[in-house]
Image: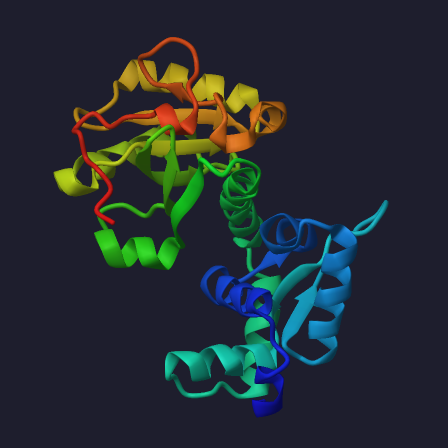
Amino acid sequence: MAGELTRLTPRDRFLLNLLDQHKTFTTDQLVDLTFGSAGRARNRLNTLLERDILDRFRHYQRPGSQAWRWTLGPVGAAIVAAGNGDTLPRPSAVRDATARLALSPTLTHLITTNGFFVALSAYARTDPATRLARWWNETACREAVGTVVRPDGHGVWVGGGHAVPFWLETDLGTETLSRVVGKLTGYAALPPSRAYPVLFWFLTAVREVNFHACLTRTRVPDGVTVATADAANTAETGGPAGPVWRVAGQPGRVSLAELSTSGGAVWDG
């Protein structure tokens, strides 16, 4: 492993840290995050794969083939553990963790959530006036707010001269809308310092429309800002950074940088 340390580039180390925190990314997501070129990404990723720094998996799919999902390999996991001062994992344990991830029923949800933050990072690469200042995974969110709510992620988006912290709820349409709306009760119980806007990232326009209809009947809890977007129709308007957010109780749509909180909570970073 020591020999590999001298061969890792700063981008490689950045990639290892991302995979340690967020578990897996597709090839296209890694292109957007760190490479900018599909050819350059494939060449470097395959090199890291051959050296056991990275691993990958995908499921059978016809027609066509599924995109590779990339994870830490045994050597990459050992490098990250050494850097964190942790016990080095056994190669077999790393392989087992990858197998469990590949078969996890929440894999699609994880990739979709990561894709949201990847899209913000990719946008920031094209606009120097913006940046994703913070990106927490589900575990980091739980450490911050306990079991009151279970956000899929948390971020701080900087743009337009100010920072917008938010909680993310990724919706794949697997829960009833009444259950989805019911999550807002937990967000209303958070302390004022954590009263960030709650973003619901839907996969279809129909799901988003039906959510707002349900929300109209139940009302938004006091002190909670709710904004929604339909992922299928955001690509041409800047993705999640663009003017795609419909704020509950307000007309039109705004960009992520234009969101504000009901309680005035600001980023604590």
Give above or below for 41 relative to 150: below
**What residue is shown at x 33% (from left), y 31% (from top)?**
161
Residue 125: x and y in percent read 55, 43
**What residue is shown at x 75% (from left), y 69% (from top)?**
46
Q: Is residue 167 visible?
A: yes
* Image quadrant assignment for residue 83: bottom left
Total labels drawn: 0
Single out the residue that lies furthest toward the right.
63
Give above or below for 177 relative to 56: above
Q: Where's the N terminus, which quadrant?
A: bottom right
Residue 16: x and y in percent read 54, 68
Residue 159: x and y in percent read 39, 33
Single out the residue that lies furthest toward the front.
128
* Image quadrant assignment for residue 222: top left
Q: Is residue 202 visible?
A: no
**What residue is shown at x 48% (from left), y 26% (from top)?**
229
Residue 250: x and y in percent read 33, 11
